[in-house]
Image (spheres, rainbow, N blue to C red):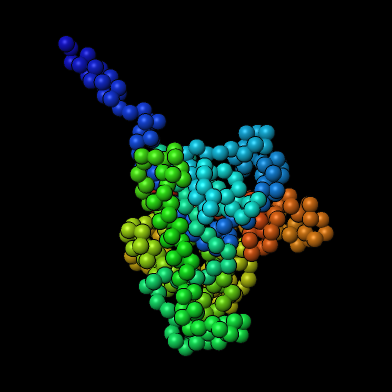
Amino acid sequence: MKRRHILVLAAALAAAARPSPEAARAAGKVKVFILVGQSNMQGKASLRTLDHQIKAERTRKQFAHLHDGKGNYLVRDDVFINFLDRHGKLEVGYGSKGRFGPELGFGWTVGDALDEPVLIIKAAYGGRSLFRDFRSPSAGLPDEAYLHKELERARKRKPETTLDDVKKMYGFAYRDMLGEVSNVRRNYQTLFPELQGKELELAGMVWFQGWNDMINADYSAAYTENLVHFIKDVRKDLGAPNLPFVIGQLGVGGPYQGDDPAKDKKEVFKANQAAAADWPEFKGNVAVVRTDQYWDPVAAEAYKVWREDIDAWRHHGDDFAYHYLGSPKIIYEIGEAFGKKMLDLLGKSAK
């Protein structure tokens, strides 16, 4: 047999032995991403507003991929999500009731870029601070003087409060988060029958939290140190020492327009958030996304007079400023940015 024929035959046999893309996908791992935070990670983007924005001239192109052209929203068959007591294939609505969060833009972005199926575990709870609620083990407790002051304040509301009661509140959301992740990792084949027989691989975490720390000077001053502890502890407790980590920097209100950010508590806090990514051991595996760049000036203008014509306002948003106006445009772009930054950390490109 001539050499050319041998090579052609060998190539044909190799092609026949190579699994199809579908078979390779079925046999591969599932990339798991953990999305953690407080109310803006829960998701406040209004579906009522999205119903308008998928048709509006200014935004319809941005959201064209989310629906079938008739307003029926699409469901991803390669991206799965667990959010507290809800689980299934990714679609709109995995935020607060009638809303979505960053998981939507994130899931579409990483789902399009990765060959493997994607599983999002979202652990988000409204009104939680890093200083107390998400405080991780290596951060320890505040000093006794601070705890006793907190005890005095607590006893004004509930006289029977003990010091142990105060101490137990530290880290409860961190423990809840680990419990959520553990539950899904343990039961994913029941929760998601499509993933039976596949192996989970922790691929990254996104942290989007900050309001409750920003409004408290003590919490804000300690934020960098507490976030460094959080990242280290998460990696240790999840058994993923270099887990890629994206920090969503607080951005409500948009980019700073003043003259002295050092005197603006929000800007000081944002700097404290970003500083955690500069920790030497985090180089190349922790990154920051500035969410203020996605603030929508059009929605912000409409918000100023929302009480005068609430129906007109709901074409742009459907919540307060601290929830990014409940704007689908803003929240989707933030989630998309989280996805792109995560792909950067993974050495992948967004499509």
Q: Which residue appears at 67% of the width and 42% of the height?
A: 54
In the foreground, 226 or 169? 169
Query: Can residue 114 be spotted in the picture?
Result: no
In the rendered image, the vertical position of residue 290 relative to residue 157, given as above or below: above
Outermost residue toward the front? 160
Outermost residue toward the right? 308
Q: Position of residue 221 (x, y in %)?
A: 49, 77
Residue 224's image quarter? bottom left
In the rendered image, the vertical position of residue 156 relative to residue 220, given as above or below: below
* The N terminus lies in quadrant: top left
* Numbered marks: total: 0
244 with respect to 93 (left or right)? left
Query: Can residue 306 be spotted in the picture?
Result: yes
Q: Position of residue 33 (x, y in %)?
A: 44, 51
Q: Which residue appears at 35% of the width and 44% of the height?
A: 199
Residue 190's image quarter? top left
Outermost residue toward the top? 1
Q: Which residue appears at 77% of the width and 59% of the height?
A: 306
In the foreground, 288 or 43? 43
315 with respect to 96 (left or right)? right
Q: Position of residue 259 (x, y in %)?
A: 61, 73
In the foreground, 204 or 63? 204
Q: Position of residue 291 (x, y in %)?
A: 56, 59
Q: Which residue appears at 62% of the width and 43% of the height?
A: 62
